[in-house]
Image (spheres, grey):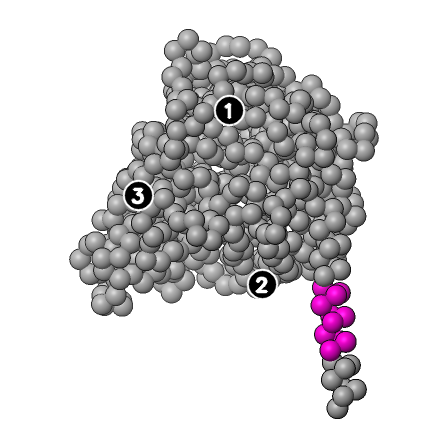
Amino acid sequence: MTNFATSLVLLLWFSLLSVYVSNTQAMAQWPVGPVGRPTKFFDFKVQTKRVSKLCNSKDIVTINGMFPGPVVYAQEGDALVVKVTNESPFNMTIHWHGVRQILSCWFDGPSYITQCPIQSGQSFTYKFTLVKQKGTLFWHAHVSWLRATVYGALIVYPRTGVPYPFKYPFQEHIIILGEYWLKDVVQLDRATIASGGSPPPADAFTINGHPGPNYNCSNNDVYMINVTPGKTYLLRLIHAGLNTENFFAIANHKLTIVEADAEYTKPFTTDRVMLGPGQTMNVLVTADQPTGRYSMAMGPYMSAKGVRFQNISSIAYFQYTGSVFNSLSVTPNLPSFNDNLVVQTIMDGLKSLNNVNLSKQIDANLFATVGLNVQKCHSKKPKQNCQGPNNGVMGASMNNISFVKPKISVLEAYYKKINGSFTEDFPEVPLQFYDFVNGAPNNIPNNTQSLNGTRTIVLEYGTRVQLIFQDTGTVSTENHPIHLHGYSFYVVGYGNGNYDEQTAKFNLVDPPYMNTIGVPVGGWAAIRFVADNPGVWFMHCHLDIHQSWGLGTAIIVKNGKGDPQTLPHPPADLPRC
């Protein structure tokens, strides 16, 4: 027995040592992070799964066979290690949306920007630290349109002992807004680009993966929250949809916004909210109505003209304890699909919880138009490949440059000084100024074309940036949810019409701190940030069809001085193209 006990102790000791060594090796290439914070490990397996929705069955791509995918729970300051093994036939990357990736750009996830995709049968381990971040974030695929089903919540709680800046809710619930297609989304992406035209609308909106009773074969495919009368609930809203912005409301209940894009806001109470793809929002709702079943509804916000969209709302239930289980639900009145005033009112209500100390000095004053284009048809099969307006090919651009993803990642090409993959000449202002909103060129496709290229913006470390986004009326004005990887930014101003430096009103006292800003339809938005995180950061419209058409660019932030301001070398298991 003595020998057996000794062997058991030695076996246990070696097991603990191997765990310590593997953890030490895993952390060896890590950026400087908080000392003594826990490391949390997750195992993501990319798998196909057969699901039945809307009277049809199809294979979808998932993480660990879950739709939506697994929730990643963490605390501010935690280090996360997520091994992604691709067991599907499709290329895959995972983007950690809203995570600032301090000195960990290699693990940001956008395909051909910071990494090549994880090919079938291969794996890649993402490693990053949640530095000074807490709130509702999410993760999603960032290759093709696989984000349609590959997404999940990333919930970052405050450090132990740090309370919320509002009364602690009775319960918290995650609400993920999505879109569902009956067709294979990878094939749909390819077919849409090949056609030169616009994509078909989603077959359904979904709330936590459920279409709800308004759709065929979906009476029982509905999400429900059971609530106790008099209690207050925190709903963590996440928009993981692809191509449509959406209103959300709960019948007869007020929503109090307390967080946007994982940053606390001054409480703002409203009847409904609007989220674009990529945006998150925390709202408090109190069960203060008569006992019953109330609908939570997700309906479309479509600001562009002439675009087909899904106009049937997805419904979930906010059901009081004590109500009849199969009782009819009270339905909310959602705004009309093109109610721009409601969207502006919601944006007007977003203010940072505390006042901020913004520097008035600007080192780089950038101006970028965002909008659609129609290219001339050069195909020998125009009926198949030129289905845009006037037999043209749809496109999208910033400063009339349609971004083309290279064959290797921009970050790898930049880091290894590989020539020929990208250029550093993205224009800091539009190539031509005119009445962007009302006088935009619309002689399709003769003067609505854009230039193509992998053009990037280059910033010195520490540059204080102001960036004006200007919507254009080429093809159609539209609200564009623009997302910047690797950073959050202060939204210091926005307005209707063309940006005018002389008349624009800025909020430099308590502007909201966001990572995705809806550039108003026929209007402009101004953001500010300090370029203090070296790497290559994708900036793009989060409507996936616009991203596919080229509405984006990459910002290269150079290294500063010393290790705390220098991007570490690439990980050994970085996928190869």
Q: Please identify, in this view, whether the residue under mark 2 or under mark 3 is nearer the observer.
A: 3
Residue 528 badge: 1
Residue 113 appears anywhere in the view: no
Whole-percent x, y for residue 502 in the image: 42, 8
Q: Secondary structure at mark 1?
A: strand
The numbered disc on residue 65 is: 2
Residue 549 placed where, x, y %? Answer: 60, 32
**Badge 3, how many Cα within 10 Å: few under 14, some, many 20+?**
many
Are the two marked residues, 3 and 1, in contact with CB atoms closer than 8 angstroms?
Answer: no
Q: Position of residue 126 (x, y in %)?
A: 67, 50
Q: Amino acid at mark 3?
A: Thr
Q: Amino acid at mark 2?
A: Gly
Spatial CA span between label 2 and label 1: 40 Å
For marks 2 and 1 on the same chain, the one whose residue lies earlier in the sequence: 2
The residue drawn where x is 78% and y is 81% is 7
Left or right of 147 in this view: 14: right
Could you tell me if the residues under marks 2 and 1 are in contact, i.e. CB atoms within 8 Å? no
Q: Secondary structure at mark 3?
A: strand
Spatial CA span between label 2 and label 3: 34 Å
Marks 3 and 2: in contact by CB < 8 Å? no
Give the magenta range: 9-19
Residue farthest toward the left in the current orientation of the protein: 290
